[in-house]
Amino acid sequence: MGSTDPWMIAEVAGPRRASVITKAEVADAIIRRARHPLLIVGSLSAEIEVDDRKLIDYLVLLAQKGGIPVVATAQVGKDLLERDLTPDRQMAAVDIAQRLADPLWKGVDGKGPHDLAMFAGLPYYLTQTVLSGLKHFAPAVKTMTLDNVYHPQASWSLSNLSLRDWVTTLRSIIENLEE
Amino acid sequence: MGSTDPWMIAEVAGPRRASVITKAEVADAIIRRARHPLLIVGSLSAEIEVDDRKLIDYLVLLAQKGGIPVVATAQVGKDLLERDLTPDRQMAAVDIAQRLADPLWKGVDGKGPHDLAMFAGLPYYLTQTVLSGLKHFAPAVKTMTLDNVYHPQASWSLSNLSLRDWVTTLRSIIENLEE
Amino acid sequence: MHFAIKELNTSLGKIRDLDISIGRIEEEGWTDPVGPTPFPSLASLRNWDLTLLQRYRPFYMPFCDLCCLCTYGKCDLTGDKRGACGIDMPAQQSRMVLLASSIGAATHLSHARELVDRILERNGHQKPIDVGGHNVEVEAPIIRLVCGIRPRTIGDLEEVLEYLETEVTQLLAATHTGMEANNLDFESKVLHAGMIDQVAMEVADIAQVSAFGFPRADPEAPLVQLGMGTVDQKKPVILVVGHNVLPSIDIIDYLEHNGLSSDVEVTGICCTATDMTRYSPSAKIIGPISWQLRYLRSGIPDVVVMDEQCIRADTLLEAQKMRTPVIATSPKNCAGLPDRSGDGAEEIVADLVAGKASGALILDSVKAAQVAVQTVLEVAPERSHFKVLPSTDMITEKAGECTQCKLCRRSCPNDLAIPDAMKAAAKGKFSLLNEMYDECVGCGRCEHACPQGIPIHSVICAAAQKQIKEETFTVRAGRGAIQDVEIRQVGGPIVLGEIPGVVAFVGCANYPKGGREVAEMCMEFAHRRYIVVTSGCAAMSAAMYRDDEGHTPYEMYPGSFEAGGLLNVGSCVSNAHIAGAAVKIASIFARRNLRANYEEIADYVYNRVGAVGVAWGAMSQKAAAIASGFWRLGIPVVVGPHGSKYRRMLLGRADKKEDWSVFDARSGERVYVGPVPEHLFVAAETKEEAAVMVAKLCMRPNDTSKGRAIKLNHYIDLHKRYMGTLPSDIPLLVRTVADIPLTMKSDVLNILRESGWSEHSIPDPTLLSSQIREKKGVR
Amino acid sequence: MHFAIKELNTSLGKIRDLDISIGRIEEEGWTDPVGPTPFPSLASLRNWDLTLLQRYRPFYMPFCDLCCLCTYGKCDLTGDKRGACGIDMPAQQSRMVLLASSIGAATHLSHARELVDRILERNGHQKPIDVGGHNVEVEAPIIRLVCGIRPRTIGDLEEVLEYLETEVTQLLAATHTGMEANNLDFESKVLHAGMIDQVAMEVADIAQVSAFGFPRADPEAPLVQLGMGTVDQKKPVILVVGHNVLPSIDIIDYLEHNGLSSDVEVTGICCTATDMTRYSPSAKIIGPISWQLRYLRSGIPDVVVMDEQCIRADTLLEAQKMRTPVIATSPKNCAGLPDRSGDGAEEIVADLVAGKASGALILDSVKAAQVAVQTVLEVAPERSHFKVLPSTDMITEKAGECTQCKLCRRSCPNDLAIPDAMKAAAKGKFSLLNEMYDECVGCGRCEHACPQGIPIHSVICAAAQKQIKEETFTVRAGRGAIQDVEIRQVGGPIVLGEIPGVVAFVGCANYPKGGREVAEMCMEFAHRRYIVVTSGCAAMSAAMYRDDEGHTPYEMYPGSFEAGGLLNVGSCVSNAHIAGAAVKIASIFARRNLRANYEEIADYVYNRVGAVGVAWGAMSQKAAAIASGFWRLGIPVVVGPHGSKYRRMLLGRADKKEDWSVFDARSGERVYVGPVPEHLFVAAETKEEAAVMVAKLCMRPNDTSKGRAIKLNHYIDLHKRYMGTLPSDIPLLVRTVADIPLTMKSDVLNILRESGWSEHSIPDPTLLSSQIREKKGVR
């Protein structure tokens, strides 16, 4: 598997494919450059084990340290609440995607359109379809995925990473944000 | 344009894409390793200008120096004859592709199946369709393209090259073969 | 009325093929006026469609950046690029949806055509339509609604079929390069395809119910056996697979006529199985499409008879591995087999038994049945039950060959952790493999991907031998239509909102986490006294559960159309009865005129009937068509996460107040009613998300306060349970204080207060200005 | 015969919709026995199909590694992987071909349905079919052949349409997931779709010829004007675009009735244009689909009327740029426009003229015509002819913005060297742009790709102003069918091989190097005294040439079906007459029974009629269907290189001697006849390769030695000219020394000697054992 092969083999996107985030600094720069980022936390984030924690724990840290509004899909809002993070919205993934594609939408916090949507912890294929919707119909929104697999439909994606490299990357992203 | 983007933007192949030949030596190794290579010369090779010559001139050299049998598609046989190379066959591109996909076929010279088919000078999209047929239905035949554009459907392809790099590469391939 | 004369000598000349048909003899009983749209064509209902689509805007999620339908292409449609024909991405995506829905509609329709032709051939044109005796006066609600005719005999259905075939042809033509240019017009045609599909399904099911004596709108249709564990392997076993029951019926008849019924097990996969058990309750259902590979490989079936639809394309190959003879019976799936239709049955049997032929195409279902039975009787004792499934030792050995390359997982539609399970299995620990059996959709992609050639699916099944043996469930045989009297009883409570909803679990088995979730959702809603309806593969999945006392869901809940009921209407084509029930509420309860009156009825259903479809494992083009049929009637559909791959959702914008006003039919005023139902087509990520959505999508503008309070109660309760919070959209759903569920009053009032909520009125809701009784100031 | 009563009071009760139809009144004239396959269904001709497919094996060239048709997918089918439904790559590719052919057939069929419905509405059921008066006794050869009926009136066509719609539905159903499993069975269904398409086209064309007084099998149909240069821009100009002539006819009638015929230019693009000129020779043809963008942007048309098929999806958008009102008239292409069908014409005109509406959907072609004419009269004087095409200065300026990123070229279907042309144009040199105009297919992808926003297509057209002005050609209006007497005259020479072949240039305009090559090929073969037939877009391209004396090809060659003739049969649906001519040779010349006798007739055509179809710019799904119809009749089709994107070829193996034997109908013996015709479907890379192929593919086993010598003469001559050598397969094509062309005798004999050639006999060839007269030792 190449580092930029789609994780699900057949999920070939087409001519336009995600740029790979090769270093945590790049992700941070993207986040910092965003005027109004949004983090979409999927149902699997409470299941996927990363190191001694769950993916969701890293995402909570990211949101908190970065002051990034959060959308919880499916029932993951409950898991966030258990971690003392109240999501700004609980919405279906396709629902938030449709909202993001509306340039007049005021965002989850009413503070205006989001220009960066970060995704993690959704089923791979659902991430792909949702990202595809945004890629084609939300030109003003850049997307970034934080899963340890390459998502060609995003604007930026991590590459296919081993668990260890993923942890390192997530930690770096979060740490850098603190600076 | 990346070096391994399809030249025609929409010609996305799927999960299996050609390996890029980054050095002339690789092409030579592939040719030398082949038990029974074949060179398919397309109609555009007599039109495409490479340096002060035509692409066909390089292909003639390659065939002659490498002792490689040649199939001329369309009317390019006439151009080969003018360059004192008698093609082993004159056949339509789809026709030779179908033959190559038959593991029992004895080859253009009756000496047995070909294990390497090299293509150059066919219209890009026709090269793609023909290579796709071979990729899926001629598992015993490897394919290589010598055009200055990336052909994802091949087994090996040159990358998208400038004219100058292409000339250098073609020359090197031919020179190396002489050794 | 219809009569035909082959040849007649008259003074006029020799008359050949005189064919007289009388549309209908006008009866006392049906004086309903013909509505505005009898036999509607492509654009007849376009205004209704655009009304819906204005509220539920398509959100496209392209499956691919390219269009590859003509040789101008492939064309890159990324961003706002257009293709060589000028098409843009929204139009292209909706065109693909139209293509899928048209394929789906054509499939049900061609199935209906075969059934009707065959019944006409055997029973003549006068065979009456009878779907429920005196209990069902409205025998064909969808046909009445769409076509404006009232079919009394099977022969009357021919006119309907011809209409449908014309429409399918038109729809398909609209997908040609350079035809429709606009995505919303494509979507309108998708809805048309869905409506055509509903009619086709109704034709098919009322024809087969009438002709074959299936349960006639019977709430107490027999409980039949389901699961691989129910098969008596000591007997010869026939497997029928597909959707067209004709060959199965001929098999059952042949066994019956030859006194062999108790000597041979007739087992089925997919809708053929469902319909077969409606014919003979002693037949057995194995499971949905996802059971095809595992059942074939189990070695249990001794002969396979395929008809049409949802049959794995590798059936012949898999059967050959087991040396199981295959009989193909449909011109739509000839499977490359030699056409033996003209040969004598004995000759074919001899070839199959001797292994001289691995299969035969027999386009004569009576002969096919005879061959199947004679063959199974001969081969079953002879042939060893091949062990393809590896032994425990073999599992470990095979698993040990795994190199952890992960290609299996990367090929798995559900991203199952196969490599981990293999690693464990190599050490003799099968628990992970076991878990996977329940979530595996049986597609076999893992095996094709494995460079080591490990027969992964077989390994999974081998490890699940115990589970497989325990697959002994019961399912209520498909009951067919809903009785008029049932409608009369629940019509009011549904329309007022006091029965919180009708939830229909339909469609295929492409589940994200196995079929058990379907059973769980069914029980959740039946328990909450929703009316729960099932059909097709979902009806099977709903059965695959036992509670602590060993009861299956169909044993736990009654089979009648009532609060807390769990009804299996039947196979794929029985889906028409679900839409039919909604339509009958408008007709029987509310006395609206059905006849060729689509728009008004759909408006009624949309605004008043709290019905929601759930196609948790929707996979096929038929499922796309079925969903489209529900949409046009204003019934929302929830799909599982794989359903996002249908390329687009139809989503409402709860946050846009201006989207959610209706006319008050009493005054003609525009009234805000809140986002109900919020979406028309939406993919849920998890079962939990789906359950909450379903509860919410059951709300309708017409709900009384009592009804709304009941619906809100379930919605809020489920939201709290699964999401951990009160839903944030409560202020949008509460219209008056009386809407608030009593037990939640203080919490809800708090929320309302914080949100600046204010009361608003409950109108007599309609989207149609034509429905306004007193017109004043109507735009 | 057919009569209908809406309502009738009888003692039986009130009868509604009494509808009596008599299949036919048996006549003296048609005593032909009904053959074996009247109204054949999906699998009726499967054996014939498999016979062809055994010789011409599909060679698949997947357009993509994936299947994306259901939500189990996407599935990777690379190599021998199978999808989640079990399908493999050959089946998936053939399934896509079936989908395309079904779309194509549905498109012609829905078009036929609209024509027939409209004619029935206006002229009643009794309107007689008349396609050529006394000159055409066999009025509907394909319908006779396939259905086994002989339609006498337009009403008789309804039965045919119903049959076709049933079949299209069945075909489409076969593409559902889990239906057909085998690629050859998919291919058989593709051939079925092709046959259905041929019948549909015949229905459409004989209906419109009969009803609208088009030329009736007229070799001297008028020469009409073609090209952008022929439009009188001083008059108001209507553009009709599409394939369904009804709105155009109503426009022409409206002009006529209002005495406006000479005041308004009616111009057309695509088949609507062709058929319009069959109705009124003063209408003008602009060109094929590739002219849509350039003509719209020229500012010449003042109103656009769209009907259906092959209409660019960006028509409305492009028209809006020019402020040209658009009227949509087909439910299949509503284009998102508001439905104004119910509004008064004046009201719509007012809105269009005032620019309050950019277009209207008017599903009533009479009203649409009225609106179009009234609008054009009002807007034409008012509106300035917008200059969208840049001036010379602007060309240079725009070209100067080019950054040489090459995205335009990489988006161009023909890989045109746009960046080079831009570079030159920036320096004021337009010759490269000029050359490109001729090769450009007008798709506009370059513009969407350009990050600088250069209106590349407009720049190309602007540079070609002189060429555009010189686009003044003539084309013979579509003549319709071939006369029986013409068939009688050439039947013998064709079957014996003495007329070297019938070459039909059909299909779309997706040319690799521009349309001129079509004209060149037509002239090449007409000059060599082949019979050259054209239709559709190809018929237009064939016209776009002038020799040194200013003659266009249709002026240079006669319009009769004779050696050296150049015949335009008409539009897309007129293609049926080409197949019809082949079939009529069997019927009229050889006195074979046509009636429901498909297999025998196809076998006859395949072995005896040296016909070849060339679809040099084949692009659409209709083209796929048309080709499939020819294949089932045993007529080979050559496509241009873009045709390789149809995903598969049907190629014979000249090197496999065992593939090329036939039965000698006289003796039943198997006889080797050589690889004739070598391929059934093949893509040629260049015009030169195509010409050589065509000459070769005209050979048939039945050729007499004299005939074969003539055919070989052309083949060898063309091969020498274009390929520079004698063809290497001469020994496979020469059966006896008498086959050798006299002038090439020594060369050919040399080759034969070297190859170890030996003489073999010329049988009475057939692929069907049923055709053997004396059966002995038949396998």
Image (tube, coloured by chain):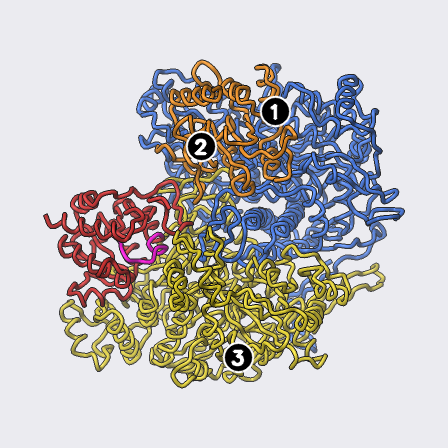
Chain colours: A orange, B red, C blue, D yellow
How dense is the environment of label 1, judged by Cα within 10 Å: few (below 14), some, or many (20 and up)? many
- According to the picture, the residue beneath numbered tag 2 turns out to be A157
Quadrant of the rendered structure where residue D361 is? bottom right
Task: Note whether D356 is above or below C460 in the view shown.
Answer: below
Circle 1: residue type: Glu
Check the residue under mark 3 and report the chain it is in.
D
Residue nearest the observer in this picture, C702 or C486: C702
Q: Which residues are magenta?
A: B119-128
**Residue C370 seen in the current view:** no
Quadrant of the rendered structure where residue B41 is? bottom left
Relative placement, left or right, of C766 versus C61 is right
Quadrant of the rendered structure where residue D683 is? bottom left
The residue at 61%/68% (across/down) is D157
Circle 2: residue type: Ser
How dense is the environment of label 3, judged by Cα within 10 Å: few (below 14), some, or many (20 and up)? many
- According to the picture, the residue beneath numbered tag 3 turns out to be D225
Check the residue under mark 1 and report the chain it is in.
C
